[in-house]
Every structure is written in C-alpha cells, then in structure tokens.
Amino acid sequence: ELGVQPRSNVDSTDAYIRWMIRRDMSTVLDIEHWSFEFPWSEDDFVNALRQRNTIGMVCEVNDHVAGFVIYELHKSHFRIVNLAVAYQYRRCGIGRLLVDKLIGKLDDRRRRVVAVVREANLAAQMLFRACGFMATAILRDHYADTDEDAYQMECSR
C-alpha cells in the first residue's frame, strides 16, 4: 500500500478522512516506523486507542492510507498524541488536512488543540505553525528515551 507514486499536491477532493479501523494497523505501523526514531509499537497504538477519550483517524488518498492522527478528548481541548504522514505524501497537504479536521471540531466547549513536538522535529513544528499553532511552553527533558526538550504548541479558536 505504501508504494504509491509521490504527488506534488493532494487535492482535498482526493483525500478522505475517516475513523481508524483494525485493518489500517499494518499501514499505520509502517508509516510510524518510517517516520520516527522512537516509534510506537502496535501495543502502544492498541493501548492508546482502548482509552475512552482517545480517537484515531486516517487520511486516505485513492484507497491508500496516507497519514493518521491519534488524539485525546479533554473537557476544554483536543490533544494530538501522534500524527504521521507516509513519506511519499509529505509536503502534499495530508498533515494539514488532518490537523484542520481537528481545528474544525472546536466549539464552545473545546476551544483549543494542543500538540507536544520534539525540539528536533522541525517538520512538525512548521506544519503546526502553518496551521495557526503557537509555541506556548518549553518542556525540558520531556522524553523518557532522550534528554530532548519539547515544545507545547496550541491553536485556539
């Protein structure tokens, strides 16, 4: 599924965002492992998605999973806990579609989308900034696997 030809830009009419289902897991795991130095395992995904307040969505392009987002529902905000785009779909608008989908869900109750981004993950920082996020905090030594800092980024409506 990941052998799709690269596209310079994905028209939003080609892309479809839907709930993540069990059969998406192998492609999601492939995207995850190719995207991150410290990727989630299948157990990490299963444990996260078993939580009542956690939701997974995928973005499909021509029947191929091009990216995914895992987010938590909180009383006043959504919290993105994982987001990745397949290599051949990067810089084509998939990440933005996924983030914009969450921003579009904001209402009188949930007024913010929050994401925590590794200091070294410039691509994610640029994506969130392009979607209207601002860094609101520096989280020192945030990760258990490294001594790397993170930025808390937020978008409010």
Image: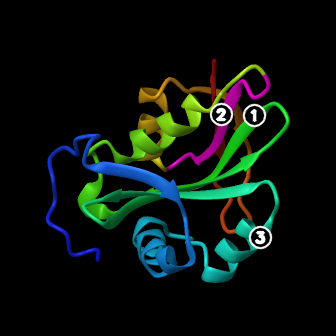
- Tell me residue 22's x, y (percent): 56, 78
- Tell me residue 9's x, y (percent): 19, 43
- Tell me residue 91's x, y (percent): 27, 45
Q: Which residue does the numbered mark 1 point to in the structure image? A: 77
Looking at the image, is mark 3 or mark 1 earlier in the sequence? 3
Q: Which residue does the numbered mark 3 point to in the structure image? A: 50
Q: Residues within 10 Å of mark 3 (few under 14, many from 20)?
A: few
Decide which of 73, 79 is in the foreground and name it. Answer: 73
Q: Which mark is residue 106?
A: none
**Can residue 147 be seen in the rendering of this structure?**
yes
Q: Residue furthest right?
A: 75
Q: Secondary structure at mark 3?
A: helix
The alpha-carbon separation of the residues under discs 1 and 2 comes to 6 Å
Residue at x-position 64% and y-position 41%: 115
Q: Secondary structure at mark 1?
A: strand
The amino acid type of the residue labelled 3 equals: Arg
**Can residue 122 be seen in the rendering of this structure?**
no
Taking 101 as reference, is 108 left or right?
A: right
Of tags 2 and 3, which is closer to the observer?
3
Residue at x-position 82% and y-position 60%: 52
Looking at the image, is mark 2 or mark 3 earlier in the sequence? 3
The amino acid type of the residue labelled 1 equals: His
Q: Work out whether 79 lies above or below 3.
A: above
The amino acid type of the residue labelled 2 equals: Val
Tags 1 and 2 touching, CB below 8 Å: yes
